[in-house]
C-alpha cells in the first residue's frame, strides 16, 4: 500500500525541496510514498493570484481567504475520488507525538493544510479540517515546516520506508521509553570506552543493559513518559533503589 501525501501550501517548492532527500526522498523514488505539493495560489479567483486579505474587525497581518483553500482541497478530493483526512497545522492544535504518527501512518491519503500570515479564514477550516495539529508551543511563520516534520515522522512508520523495520519499532517513544545510548567504532574515543557489555556478544545481557539504560534515561529526561511506560514490578523497585 502506498501512502499519498497532498500538501496545500503557498510555498510548494519548500515542500518539494525539503522532502526529496535521504530516506524520504528514496521512498518517494521507489513509489512507497507519493508527495504532491498543491499551490493554493493556483486556485486564486483574481488575476493577481492574491489569496489573502485584511482581517475583519481590524488587527495586524493578513488572513488566507477561504475559497482558494477550499478549491485546492476540492481538487485533491476530485483527483483521489475521496475526501481524505485534512490536517491543519496550527499552534492551537493537539500536540503531535509518536502515537499520532503511528495512527496516521495507517491512512492511504493525507492532506496537510499549511497556513501562513495570521492563519486561514475560520469558515473553511470548520468545513474541511478533520484534525488540528501543532508541533509545539511556539509560533512559526507557516505550516510548511510542521507539515514536513509530520510527514517525516509518519513516513518512518510506513512499511518499507526504513530499510530495517526494527529500527522504527524499538526507538524512542515506542513503549513510552526513550532509546538507550548508541555507540559505533572506534572502541575508544577521546579516552572514553564503549560499555563493555556491548562488546561481550552476550545478547541477553545487551538487551537487559539497553532496557535499563532506556528506563534510566526516561526517568532523567522525561519522567512524564515514565508514568505511562509498562515497567515490571522488579524494574520499578530497581529504579527506586
Ligand atoms: N495567528 C495564529 C495564532 O496565533 O494561532 C498563528 C499564525 S502563524 C504566524 C502562521 C501559520 O503557521 C499557521 O496558520 C500554521 O499553519 C503555522 N504554524 C505556526 N506555528 C505552528 C506550530 N507550532 N505548529 C503547527 N503549525 C504552526
Image: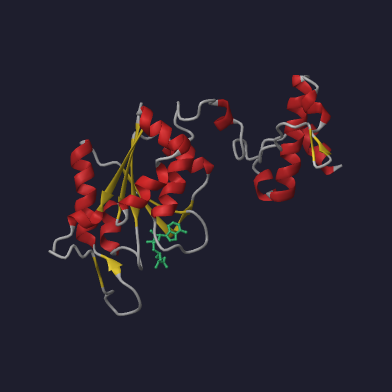
- Where does the image place residue 133, in percent across and percent down from the top left? 43, 52
The residue under the point 35% across, 77% down is: 60
Left or right of residue 23: residue 63: left
The residue under the point 26% across, 74% down is: 54
- Where does the image place residue 73, in percent across and percent down from the top left? 24, 49
Left or right of residue 116: residue 231: right
Q: Residue 70 falls in which quadrant of the image?
A: bottom left
The residue under the point 73% across, 32% down is: 211
Image quadrant, ligand 1: bottom left
- Which residue lies most toward the right here? 241
Q: Quadrant of the N terminus?
A: top left
Q: In this view, does 180 lie above or below 18?
A: above
The residue under the point 23% across, 61% down is: 66
Left or right of residue 5: residue 73: left
User: In this rendering, does residue 64 appear at all?
Assistant: yes
Q: In this view, does 44 lie above or below 184?
A: below
Image color mode? secondary structure
Amino acid at each position: 500500500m502506498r501512502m499519498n501525501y497532498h500538501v496545500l501550501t503557498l510555498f510548494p517548492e519548500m515542500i518539494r525541496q525539503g522532502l526529496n532527500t535521504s530516506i524520504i526522498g528514496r521512498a518517494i523514488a521507489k513509489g512507497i510514498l507519493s508527495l504532491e505539493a498543491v499551490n493554493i495560489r493556483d486556485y486564486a479567483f483574481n488575476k493577481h493570484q492574491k489569496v489573502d486579505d485584511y482581517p475583519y474587525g481590524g488587527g495586524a497581518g493578513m488572513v488566507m481567504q477561504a475559497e482558494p483553500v477550499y478549491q485546492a482541497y476540492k481538487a485533491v478530493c476530485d483527483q483521489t475520488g475521496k475526501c481524505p483526512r485534512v490536517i491543519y497545522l496550527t499552534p492551537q492544535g493537539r500536540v503531535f507525538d509518536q502515537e499520532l504518527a503511528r495512527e496516521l501512518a495507517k491512512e492511504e491519503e493525507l492532506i496537510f493544510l499549511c497556513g501562513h500570515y495570521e492563519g486561514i479564514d475560520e469558515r473553511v477550516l470548520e468545513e474541511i479540517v478533520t484534525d488540528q495539529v501543532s508541533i509545539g508551543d511556539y509560533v512559526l511563520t507557516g505550516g510548511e515546516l510542521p507539515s514536513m516534520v509530520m510527514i517525516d515522522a509518519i513516513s518512518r512508520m510506513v512499511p518499507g520506508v526504513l530499510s530495517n523495520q526494527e529500527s522504527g519499532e524499538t526507538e524512542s517513544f515506542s513503549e513510552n521509553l526513550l532509546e538507550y545510548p548508541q555507540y559505533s567504532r572506534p572502541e575508544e574515543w577521546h579516552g572514553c570506552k564503549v560499555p563493555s557489555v556491548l562488546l561481550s556478544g552476550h545478547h541477553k545481557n545487551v538487551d537487559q543493559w539497553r532496557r535499563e539504560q532506556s528506563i534510566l534515561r526516561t526517568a532523567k529526561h522525561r519522567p512524564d513518559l515514565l508514568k505511562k511506560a509498562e515497567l515490571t514490578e522488579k524494574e520499578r523497585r530497581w529504579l527506586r533503589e
